[in-house]
Image (cartoon, rainbow, N blue to C red):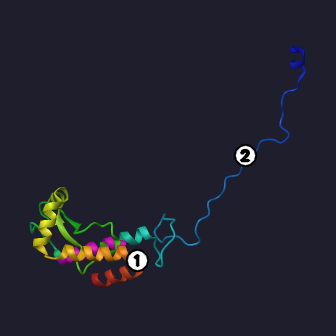
Amino acid sequence: MTDELKRRKPLTRKTPLSRKAAKRKRLPAVVCAIRGCRRRPTAIDVCVTHAKRELDRLCRQIVLARDGRCVSCHTFGESSPLQWAHCLSRRTLAIRWSLAPPNSTMLCASCHYRFTMTPEDWWDFLDEWRPGLVDELRKLRREAIAAGEKIDYVGKLAELREAAA
């Protein structure tokens, strides 16, 4: 039996092993106008991520010009910088950039932190500051969620650019 094992030839492959060529990733025909971004753009030249970023920037400018100070403690940002704060969460895009009714305001960093840590105080403050605002925003949010409507980024950008001018 051992002589028989010694006489056998080593196993060989009939076809040699070959390395498969790496598949090239296909890029979309059109990419975002922002340098380095390879996402597909919306109707405008930028992708959804950069459109949201531009909408946030414009809305913050508008609210800063409108309020100009912390609406809670009335400081102009001397002790802590002013921050753009939302009455209801930014998560719901239908009301995220809402100017009428306003879903955002300016708060100094200390007030923003305080209201973030104690939401009950925030709701009480909103009821004193603008009675009925929270109910109106919640109604708009419910309607948008029920309708399942998509955000028109082009229209929203045009609206905010017009308001900022």
Image quadrant in which you'd find residue 132:
bottom left
Residue under numbered circle 2: 19
Mark 1–mark 2 distance (CA, rounded to whole Å)? 49 Å
Residue under numbered circle 1: 149
Mark 2 Cα within 10 Å, few/some/many (few <14, many 20+)?
few
x, y percentage for residue 38?
Answer: 52, 65
Image quadrant in which you'd find residue 125:
bottom left
* Mark 1 or mark 2: whose residue is earlier in sequence: 2
Q: Secondary structure at mark 2?
A: loop
Q: Main secondary structure of the magenta part?
A: helix
Q: Magenta residues, as a range?
A: 54-66
Residue 102 is one of the magenta-drawn residues? no
The residue lying at 28 percent from left, 83 percent from top is 163
Q: Amino acid at mark 1?
A: Glu
Mark 1 Cα within 10 Å, few/some/many (few <14, many 20+)?
few
x, y percentage for residue 126?
Answer: 15, 70
The residue lying at 89 percent from left, 15 percent from top is 3
Foreground tag (1 vs 2): 1
Quarter containing the N terminus: top right
